[in-house]
Image (cartoon, grey):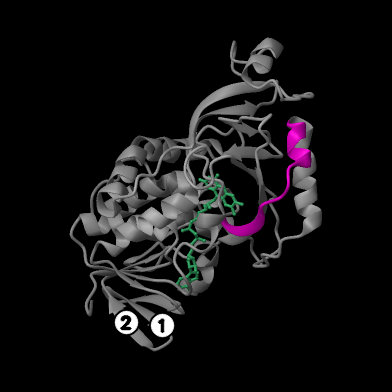
Amino acid sequence: MNHPDLCIAGAGIIGLSIALELYGRGYRVAVFDRGAPLAESSTAAAGMLAAHDPDNPPQLLTLANLSLSLYTEFLDRVRALSGINIPFQTHTTLQSISPHTIPANTELTHEDLTRLLPALTPGNHRFILLDEHSLDPRQLASALLTAIGATTIDLRLHTPVLSARSIGDEVEITIPNGIIHTAQFINCAGAWAASASRLPNIPVMPKKGQMFSVPLPSSLPLHFVVRTPDIYIVPRTIGPSAGRAIVGATVEDVGFDKTVHSVDIDRLRFLASSLLPAIGHAPQLEAWSGLRPATPDGLPLLGLIPGQPNHFIASGHYRNGILLAPAAAQVIAQLIAGETPSIDLSPYSPARSLSLIPSP
Ligand SMILES: Cc1cc2nc3c(=O)[nH]c(=O)nc-3n(C[C@H](O)[C@H](O)[C@H](O)COP(=O)(O)OP(=O)(O)OC[C@H]3O[C@@H](n4cnc5c(N)ncnc54)[C@H](O)[C@@H]3O)c2cc1C
C-alpha cells in the first residue's frame, strides 16, 4: 500500500484492534512494528477481563464497561475474518475484597467457599464472586493475526517508528529507511510509546510483570479465576492449554528489563500455594514476563497528543489492555472520523499528560 490514509505504530492488541476497526470503516491502514506482532505485553497477559477488579482506578469503569459491551462483537469480527473461534476460558472470578468495601450480602460464607472450591485455604481473605470472563491471549493473538492477514491492512514488521511530528495538516513519521507523510498517526507502541513519538509529554512507562504456568493436578479441577490483591490463578479450560493454570504477577519498576528471576517466581508460587496448596507441588511449565504500559494515574491515554494535530495516542492500558482493546478501538476510530465518542473521554485525555509529568 503506497498511500495509507493513516499509520499506526505498534502491532500489539491495541494497535491491531484499532487497525481492524478502521479497516471496517473503509480506511487504508498501515501498521508498523519494531519487531514481531503481538510479541510483547499482549501475549504475556493472563487474559482476565477484570472490569470490576477493586484495584482498578474508579474512573476506568466507564471505559471498561464500554469494552465489555463490545467484546462479543469484537470476537465475532475476528472469527468472521479468521475462521477461528476464541472461547472464554472462565466465566466467574473468586475475588478477595477488603472488609471495608465489601458490598452488603455478597460475601461468601465458609460453607459457600467449601462447596465452590474445597481445596481453597482462604486464610484471612474475604471473598465475593464476580461475573467476569477470561480468555487466552495467545489464542486471541493467533486469531487476530489471521484476521489481519485476511484484510488489506499493511503490516510492516521489524520497522520501528523512530519519531513522529505534526507538520501542517500531516504527520511526518521517520522509519529506518525513510520518511512517510500520513494524514493521521496513532501511537500504539505500548510501554515504548514515549520513544515511538519521541515527544517529551508522553508519561507512559513500563511496569514489568512476571508469571508462570503449571499443570493443574487432578485433585484441583479449577473452572474460575481466584484473585487477591497479591496473586491470581487463572485456569485454562479450553484449547491447547486446557488443564493449565497461569499464576501471576509481579508489578515492578525496573525499566525495560524482562529477565525472569526464579526468586520472584518462587514468591508467586508461595502466594498461590497459600490459597491452593496443590499449586505448591505442581511442576513449572513456563515462566515469562511482559511490560505493561503504565501511566502515573493508572488510566490510559486515548486521543490527540496536545499541540500535535492529527497525532493520536492509544497507550497506557496498564493491567487491562486485553479488556480495553475493543473500547479503545471504537473511541479512537470515532475521534479519527470526527464523530462524538460513545463515552466521555476526558478522564483518558492525553491533555492531562502535562499535569502527570513531574516537573524537573
Ligand atoms: C504479566 C501481565 C499480565 C497481564 N494480564 C492482563 C489481564 O489479565 N487482562 C488484561 O486486560 N490485561 C492484562 N495485561 C495488560 C495487557 O497485556 C496490556 O495492557 C496490553 O497488552 C497492552 O497492549 P499494547 O498493544 O498497548 O502493548 P504491547 O502488546 O506491548 O504492544 C506494543 C507494540 O509496540 C511495538 N513497538 C514498540 N516501539 C515501537 C516503535 N518505535 N515503532 C513501532 N512499534 C513499536 C512493540 O514491538 C509491540 O509489538 C497484563 C500484562 C502483563 C505484562
Whole-percent x, y for residue 122 in the image: 75, 24
Whole-percent x, y for residue 238 in the image: 48, 39
Label 2: state its secondary structure: strand
Image quadrant occupied by the N terminus: bottom left
- Placement of 109 over or under 330, stated as above or below: above
- Name which residue lies at 31% across and 66% down: 310
- Name which residue lies at 66% across and 30% down: 220
Residue stretch rendered in magenta on the structure: 276-294
- Placement of 343 over or under 330, stated as above or below: above
Label 1: state its secondary structure: strand
Whole-percent x, y for residue 231 in the image: 69, 39
Residue type beneath disc 2: Ile
Whole-percent x, y for residue 209 in the image: 65, 54
- Placement of 207 over or under 48, stated as above or below: below
Answer whether residue 347 is visible to the viewer in this image. no
According to the picture, the residue beneath numbered tag 1 turns out to be 175
Q: In which quarter of the image is residue 167?
A: bottom left
- Name which residue lies at 50% across and 56% down: 42
Q: Which of marks 1 and 2 is nearer the N terminus?
A: 1
- Placement of 213 over or under 103, stated as above or below: below
Answer whether residue 206 is visible to the viewer in this image. yes
According to the picture, the residue beneath numbered tag 2 turns out to be 180
User: Local crowd at mark 1 within 10 Å, few (<14), some, or many (≥20)?
Assistant: some
